[in-house]
Image (cartoon, rainbow, N blue to C red):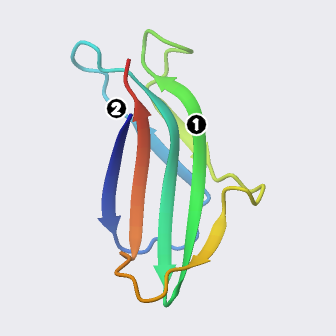
Amino acid sequence: MDIFCIRAVSLGDLEKVLISHDGTGPGSGWFLDKIVIKHKEGEEAQEVVFPCNRWLDQYQDDGKTERELTANKDGSSMKTFLKGKSCFPTSVFYAIVFAV
């Protein structure tokens, strides 16, 4: 499992994300479990999960290397939490990738 973290400016309330790769090189495909975006304003932080659970690989699954993901709105993946005085970045992007 690989976890990537990218700090960015706030993009507001996200409903969808688009993720892809160009498919070049041997073994370029990968399995994406989910994307987690954490956003903080003041002392309150929110986490939004974009589930995927699919391959981005031209030779696996449906052969697509691009996915449009929708935020999980069932409440179990959209959490609001307090961080106190921790040094928490404005926005953090996590992509959890399983390589085979």
Observer-nearest of 81 and 29: 81
Image depth: mark 1 or mark 2 in front: 1
Residue at horizontal 41 percent and vertical 35 percent from the top: 97
Residue 2 position (above or below residue 93): above
Ranked by sequence position, the earlier of labels 1 and 2 is: 2
Q: Which amino acid, by three-letter code, is at mark 2?
A: His
Confirm whether residue 14 shows in the render: no
The residue beneath circle 1 is 52
Please state if 86 lies on the left or on the right of 26 as rendered. right
The location of residue 8, given as percent across then percent down, is 33, 68
Q: Quadrant of residue 85?
A: bottom left
Q: CA–CA distance between discs 1 and 2?
A: 15 Å
Identify the residue at image location x=44%, y=9%: 59
Residue 9: give its label.
none
Identified by mark 1, the residue type is Cys
Q: Residues within 10 Å of mark 1 (few under 14, many from 20)?
A: some
- Residue 30 lies, in percent from the top left, at 40, 25
Tag 2 residue: 21
Q: Are marks 1 and 2 in contact (CB under 8 Å)?
A: no
Please say if 85 is above or below 77: below
Taking the image as shown, residue 6 lies to the left or right of residue 64, namely left
